[in-house]
C-alpha cells in the first residue's frame, strides 16, 4: 500500500494531531507521503506520477479541495477521512461523506447516525494519545495545582467550576481562552482560582497534568448553540483528554458517558453524573494518594498499550488494506 496523508490544514491542536499521525506513519511497513492541503493542487500531477498513491487519508476533510477529490476519484484512488469533530460539527461532516470511501468517526452515536442514513463504510475510532508528548514523571513545582481543568469554557464547564468554587474550599487552576470573561465577577480574581488565559501547547499541558493533585474532565455539550449539530446528536464517546491525562498518570474525575465502561472500569477511572457527585468525589479522592496511585498506574498501563496513535493508525491501515 502507498498512502498519501493530507494534513488537516488547521493550526494549534490540529497541528499536534497531524504531527502525532505523521510520527506513527514513520513506523509503518508501507510507503507514505504527506502534503499540506494548500500545496496539494499544484503537486497533484507530480504526486500521482512519481508516488502512485493507492489511498488518500486526511483529518476532517473540509480543507481538501474538490478539484483534488475529483482528480483522485478519476484515477480510482480511494479516499479516507477521520472525522474528529463529531458530533459537534456533524452537519459539516454530512456534506463531505460522499467524497470518501472509508469514514472513521470518533463518536459511537455519530456512527449510528451515519449508519441510519445508509452509509456502510463508517467505523468508530476515537482519538488517542501521543505517548511521546503525554508521559509520566515530568515533575516541576512551577506547574503544581490542587484541582486542574484545561479546556474551553463551554457553559456546562463554567457552571461546574462556579458550583465547585461556591461549595468547596479547594484551589482551582483553570487554563483556556476566554475563561475570565465567562466567570461571574466575584470569581474572576478570587484568591482560590488561578486563570491562565489562552491556548497552551500539548507539551505544556502534559506538565500541568503531571503536577496536579486532581484533574477535572467534563465533556463538551452536544447542545452548545455554536455547534453545527441541528439534529442534536449526542456525544457518547469519551474525549481524548481522558487518554492524555491517563498517559501522564494524572488522576482525573471524568463526566460519565455511555461509552466510558467500554474503555475503562471503575478500578481505573472515577466518573461523575452530576455537579454534586463531582464535588463528593473530589472531596473523597483529592488527598487519598494511595488509592489515586493504584488507579493511575492501572489506567496508564491500559492507555499506553491500547489507546495510542500507533494503535489507531494500525486500525485504520488494517481497514484500508483489507
Image: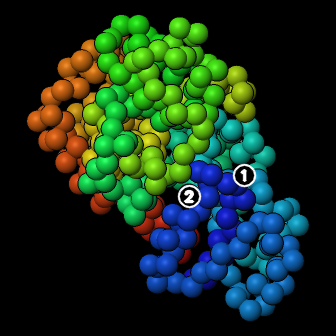
Callouts 1 and 2 close, C-beta under 8 Å: no
Mark 1, other Cα within 10 Å: few <14 / some 14–19 / many ≥20: some
Q: Which residue is mark 1?
A: 97
Relative horizontal placement of residue 259, taking residue 38 as reference (left or right): left
Is label 2 in a helix, a strand or a loop? helix
Label 2: few (<14), some (14–19) or many (≥20) C-alpha neighbours in 10 Å = some
Residue lying furthest bottom in this view? 50
Residue 16 - label:
2
Residue at point 28%, 50% (across, down): 139
Q: Residue at x 15, y 34 (%)?
A: 289
Q: Earlier in the sequence, mark 1 or mark 2?
A: 2
In the image, what residue occupies the spot 47% across and 71% down?
Answer: 24
Q: Residue at x 60, y 38 (%)?
A: 198
Tell how many labels.
Answer: 2
Tell me if residue 51 comes above or below residue 241 in the rendering: below
* Residue 208, placed above or below residue 64: above
**129 to the left or right of 289:** right
Answer left or right for 7 relative to 267.
right
Secondary structure beneath label 1: helix
Is residue 246 in view from this perspective? no
Q: Observer-nearest residue: 94 or 169?
A: 169
Foreground: 272 or 118? 272
Q: Nearer the viewer, mark 1 or mark 2?
A: 2
Q: Position of residue 102 (x, y in %)?
A: 63, 61
Horizontal and vertical percent position of residue 309: 45, 61
Q: Quadrant of residue 116?
A: top right
Q: Position of residue 262 (x, y in %)?
A: 34, 41
In x, y percent, where is residue 280?
Answer: 27, 14
Amino acid at each position: 500500500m502507498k498512502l498519501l496523508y493530507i494534513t488537516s490544514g488547521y493550526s494549534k491542536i490540529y497541528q499536534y494531531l497531524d504531527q502525532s499521525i505523521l510520527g506513527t506513519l514513520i513506523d509503518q511497513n508501507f510507503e507514505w507521503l504527506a502534503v499540506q492541503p494548500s500545496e496539494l493542487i499544484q503537486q497533484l500531477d507530480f504526486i500521482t506520477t512519481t508516488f502512485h498513491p493507492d489511498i488518500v487519508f486526511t483529518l476532517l476533510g473540509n480543507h481538501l479541495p474538490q478539484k483534488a477529490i475529483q482528480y483522485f476519484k478519476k484515477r480510482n484512488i480511494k479516499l479516507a477521512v477521520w472525522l474528529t469533530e463529531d458530533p459537534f460539527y456533524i452537519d459539516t461532516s454530512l456534506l463531505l461523506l460522499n467524497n470518501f470511501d472509508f469514514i472513521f468517526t470518533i463518536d459511537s452515536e455519530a456512527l449510528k447516525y451515519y449508519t441510519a442514513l445508509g452509509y456502510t463504510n463508517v467505523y468508530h475510532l476515537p482519538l488517542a494519545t501521543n505517548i511521546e508528548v503525554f508521559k509520566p514523571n515530568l515533575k516541576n513545582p512551577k506547574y503544581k495545582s490542587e484541582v486542574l481543568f484545561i479546556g474551553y469554557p463551554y457553559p456546562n464547564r463554567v457552571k461546574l467550576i462556579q458550583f465547585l468554587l461556591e461549595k468547596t474550599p479547594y484551589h482551582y487552576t483553570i487554563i483556556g481562552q476566554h475563561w475570565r470573561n465567562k466567570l461571574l465577577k466575584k470569581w474572576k480574581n478570587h484568591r482560590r482560582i488561578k486563570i491562565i488565559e489562552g491556548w497552551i501547547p500539548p507539551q505544556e499541558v502534559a506538565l500541568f497534568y503531571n503536577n496536579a493533585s486532581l484533574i477535572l474532565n467534563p465533556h463538551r455539550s452536544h447542545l452548545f448553540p455554536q455547534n453545527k449539530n441541528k439534529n442534536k446528536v449526542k456525544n457518547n464517546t469519551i474525549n481524548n483528554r481522558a487518554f492524555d491525562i491517563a498517559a501522564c498518570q494524572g488522576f482525573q474525575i471524568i463526566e460519565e458517558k455511555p461509552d466510558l465502561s467500554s474503555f475503562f472500569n471503575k478500578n481505573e477511572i472515577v466518573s461523575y453524573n452530576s455537579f454534586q457527585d463531582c464535588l463528593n468525589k473530589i472531596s473523597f479522592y483529592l488527598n487519598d494518594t494511595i488509592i489515586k496511585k493504584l488507579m493511575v498506574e492501572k489506567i496508564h498501563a491500559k492507555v499506553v498499550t491500547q489507546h495510542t496513535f500507533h494503535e489507531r493508525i494500525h486500525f485504520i491501515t488494517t481497514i484500508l488494506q483489507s
